[in-house]
């Protein structure tokens, strides 16, 4: 960038004047009889030195004031290049930089106000926990939810539940869990998530609390409605022939003479239908109990090989395509998971028989983003879109010989593992069940 021309010119003039004055003063000192000249020359030297010092010092003070304003973040300050201070080009560049910094600070301030408003208005309660300030609400939702206590210590939050207070006091890894909070309207279930952040060298734990009681109640009511609908359908289907057979048997026995052989046949059939209804009720009891897991790590390849042998023994006319990525290790209950996959493979084989062409079922295991994907695809006609919501309901079935229990139990087992199961379209239109663990 270089020095300002005016500053350089004035600096050169003052240095030149000082050198001339020094030369004159030295000459007057060497020549006798020039006492008055010597005094005048000395005064000129002092004047030139003072002028040079003032010129440089004025510029230094201007730069120092600018740097001080910059240090105090006074971005409204401008470089004063008036009065011969010099550095005009430098001053214009610094002024432009200051304007840029001020604009950037204004943008940052607007962005910060937006983020603060966003956090403050978000519907999820947010708490911050640190050693300096304790546990403090960070937004409106938190202030509304936790307004019945005094203090910022984690134990002060025990009024909402001892478990919740202990979670605020813990300094462990990030977690997510469903807790019950004691609220004025009664116990409320809430999803509590914790995470750790670093701010200005201080470790801060962030806790979000999302009450979900209303949502869970809605889902529970919908599930109960679906369950009642399916149970009513299945029980009525079983009771209708039972009622008819009972009436037929009574009429045969009331006849003159009683038709005992036909009545015996009717009663025998009635007994079989009653036994079927009993088995259905037993199936309901099985569905109503969550499975107990015995998890352990095990290798996928031998596990799948055993499933393939079991499948071949039952369905030797259906081709099983096995795709297993090497070195996959599963962390699950091998017996329950095997039961789920056997049921899905059996369903796939039965669906394949209802389709046209070659019958096959594909079993695939792979690792995707740290999770295990298990896919079972068949060559059948697939599951209609309007039935996909119901197939995991207990006792819902599209097959005359089906019980409607297998897919519901499969979903219970997968959910108990912390995973998910869903259905989609296969590559050729068949059903594709995908389990993610």
Image (cartoon, rainbow, N blue to C red):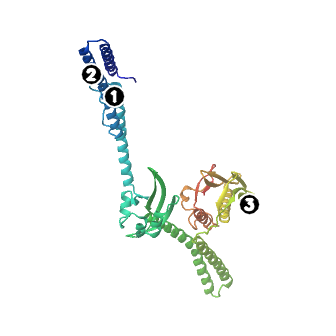
Viewer-nearest of discs 2 and 3: 2
Give the side of residue 285 with respect to residue 342, left or right. Answer: left
Which residue is more in the foreground, 404 or 28? Answer: 28
**Chain-order first, disc 2 or disc 1:** 2
Give the side of residue 7 with respect to residue 287, left or right. Answer: left
Tell me where residue 124 appears, x and y as whole percent. Answer: 41, 58
Which residue is more in the foreground, 296 or 103? Answer: 103
- Above or below, 257 against 205 in this view is below
- Image mark for residue 306: 3
Which residue, given by chain and number where applicable, does mark 1 sit on?
A: 91
Which residue is more in the foreground, 430 or 433? Answer: 433
Residue 22 visible (yes or no): yes
**Chain-order first, disc 3 or disc 1:** 1
Tell me where residue 191 appears, x and y as whole percent. Answer: 47, 62
Tell me where residue 168 appears, x and y as whole percent. Answer: 46, 63
The quarter of the displayed image where residue 88 is located: top left
Which residue, given by chain and number where applicable, does mark 2 sit on?
A: 47
Q: Quadrant of the C terminus?
A: bottom right
- Above or below, 13 against 242 in this view is above
Secondary structure under the numbered disc 1 in the rendered image: helix
Secondary structure under the numbered disc 2 in the rendered image: helix
């Amino acid at each position: 960038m270089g020095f300002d021309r005016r500053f350089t010119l004035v600096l050169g003039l003052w240095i030149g004047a000082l050198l001339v004055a020094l030369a004159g003063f030295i000459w007057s000192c060497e020549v006798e009889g020039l006492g008055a000249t010597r005094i005048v020359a000395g005064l000129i030297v002092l004047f030139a030195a003072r002028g040079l010092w003032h010129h440089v010092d004025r510029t230094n003070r201007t730069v120092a004031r600018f740097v001080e304003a910059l240090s105090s973040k006074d971005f409204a300050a401008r470089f004063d290049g008036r009065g011969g201070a010099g550095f005009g080009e430098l001053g214009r560049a610094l002024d432009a930089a200051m304007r840029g910094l001020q604009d950037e600070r204004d943008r940052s301030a607007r962005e910060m106000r937006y983020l603060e408003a966003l956090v403050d208005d978000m519907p999820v309660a947010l708490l911050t926990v640190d050693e300096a300030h304790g546990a403090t609400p960070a937004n409106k939702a938190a202030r509304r939810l936790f307004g019945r206590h005094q203090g910022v210590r984690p134990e002060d939050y025990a009024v909402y539940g001892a478990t919740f207070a202990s979670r605020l006091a813990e300094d462990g890894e990030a977690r997510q869990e469903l807790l019950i909070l004691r609220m004025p309207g009664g116990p409320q279930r809430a999803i509590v998530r914790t995470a750790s952040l670093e701010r200005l060298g201080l470790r801060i734990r962030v806790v979000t609390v999302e009450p979900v009681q209303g949502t869970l109640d809605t889902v529970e009511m919908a599930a109960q409605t679906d369950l009642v609908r399916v149970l009513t359908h299945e029980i009525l289907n079983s009771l209708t022939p039972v009622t008819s057979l009972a009436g037929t048997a009574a009429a045969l026995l009331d006849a003159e003479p009683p038709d005992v052989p036909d009545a015996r046949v009717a009663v025998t059939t009635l007994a079989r239908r009653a036994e079927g209804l009993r088995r259905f009720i037993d199936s309901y009891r099985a569905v109503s109990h969550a499975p107990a897991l015995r998890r352990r790590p095990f290798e996928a390849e031998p596990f799948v090989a055993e499933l393939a042998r079991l499948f071949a023994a039952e369905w030797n006319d259906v081709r099983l395509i096995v795709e297993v990525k090497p070195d996959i290790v599963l962390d699950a209950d091998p017996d329950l998971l095997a039961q789920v996959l056997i049921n899905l493979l059996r369903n796939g084989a039965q669906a394949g028989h209802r389709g046209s062409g070659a019958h096959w079922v594909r079993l695939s295991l792979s690792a995707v983003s740290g999770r295990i994907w298990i896919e079972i695809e068949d060559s059948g006609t697939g599951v209609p879109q309007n039935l996909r919501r119901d197939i995991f309901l207990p006792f819902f079935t599209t097959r005359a010989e089906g019980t409607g229990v297998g897919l519901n139990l499969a979903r219970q087992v997968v959910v108990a593992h912390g995973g998910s199961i869903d259905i989609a379209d296969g590559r050729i239109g068949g059903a594709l069940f995908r389990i993610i663990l």
